[in-house]
Image: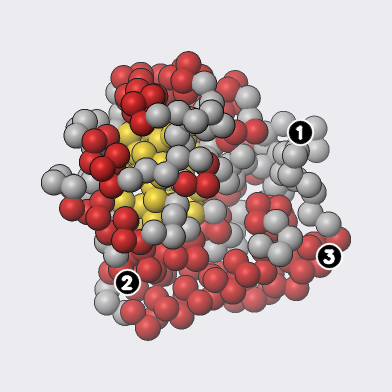
Amino acid sequence: MKQFKGIYAALMTPFGKDGKVNFDAMGKLIDRCIQSGVSGFYVCGSTGEGLLLSVRERNEIYAFVGEYAAGRAKLIAHVGSLATRDAVAMAKNVRKCGFDAVSAVPPFYYAYGFEEIAGYYRAIADAAELPVIVYNFPNAGTKFTIRDIEELFRDARFAGIKHTSQDLYQLERYKHLGREIAVFNGYDEMLLAGLSMGADGGIGSTYNCLPRTAVGIYKAFCEGRIADAQKLQTFLNEFVEQIVRYGVFACEKEILTLTGIPMGDCRAPFRPLGEEGKQAMKSIVNKLREQEGDWKE
């Protein structure tokens, strides 16, 4: 499990004016994040608008990222879907694309029981033949208990968990399941807190825009420089306060566009960033540049 640690950017999906995936921009974003020290990428997750993409588009992205980032970063493919058959089909594909692990949000909308959710994850594990990273995101509708997690992780194919929850007690308990698993903190604004409770790293959306800041928090924590880590976490949280006013993903895409990587708009039903939001993002770019250094395409 030592390979699954550090800062993973929840990779954003750029779109061109035609609405199609902009792979040139995606490559530039991958390069920038790697140059900034990220350990890996979480592909086609919430930040990547994965659930708004077709299965075909997601498979094309897995193929591109698998080839483009090969040997340069660890790769986790999010294959979560409402239908098990789609998740299974994508899981089979990511193995061929060279990914290191597969992940999935639990099946949503319908009120599934635990055994149904466990069956979904096991089907993904069977198809992928890769380590599985469970995605604990209560906002999606499933609230795993510690007992649920203990049951899932009796299966050795389950390698870790992405914990996007404010329950840091539960995060800490994951490190005491009877065997070692990788634990990723999910909420960017709680990265330092998650690390202090035992997380091995973080998977985050803002790490597309602030990769050096996130990597700095992780390194400072690992080196015992807690005051430095707190300062960087405060900077990241001030950024979060700005973007939640107008729409997180739309703001992040605007920041990236302003700094040389054309990202396009988010997919409907997300609304395009309004003029007020665009002006707000322009006003903070210079401050971000000072923190992140000269951005390179």
What amino acid is labelled 2 in the image? Phe
Where is 107 relative to 251, above or below?
above
Q: Marks 3/1: CA distance?
A: 23 Å
Q: Nearer the viewer, residue 155 or 5?
A: 155
Where is 107 relative to 248, above or below?
above
Q: Which residue is mark 2?
A: 221
Classify 10 Å Cα crowding around label 1: few (below 14), some (14-19), many (20 and above): few
Q: Marks 1/2: CA distance?
A: 40 Å
Residue furthest left as drawn = 178
Classify 10 Å Cα crowding around label 2: few (below 14), some (14-19), many (20 and above): some
Q: Quadrant of residue 70?
A: top left
Left or right placement of residue 227 versus residue 294 in this view = left
Q: Is residue 4 visible?
A: no
Q: Quadrant of the C terminus?
A: bottom right
What amino acid is labelled 3 in the image? Glu
Classify 10 Å Cα crowding around label 3: few (below 14), some (14-19), many (20 and above): few
Task: Identify the residue shown where x is 56% and y is 31%.
Answer: 109
Q: Quadrant of the N terminus?
A: top left
Where is 230 relative to 242, above or below?
below
Q: Which residue is mark 1?
A: 19
Q: Which residue is mark 3?
A: 276
Task: Identify the residue shown where x is 35% and y is 61%.
Answer: 168
Color theme of the render: secondary structure
Question: Which label lies toward us, 3 or 2?
Answer: 3
Q: Quadrant of residue 98?
A: top left
Left or right placement of residue 267 versus residue 157 in this view = right
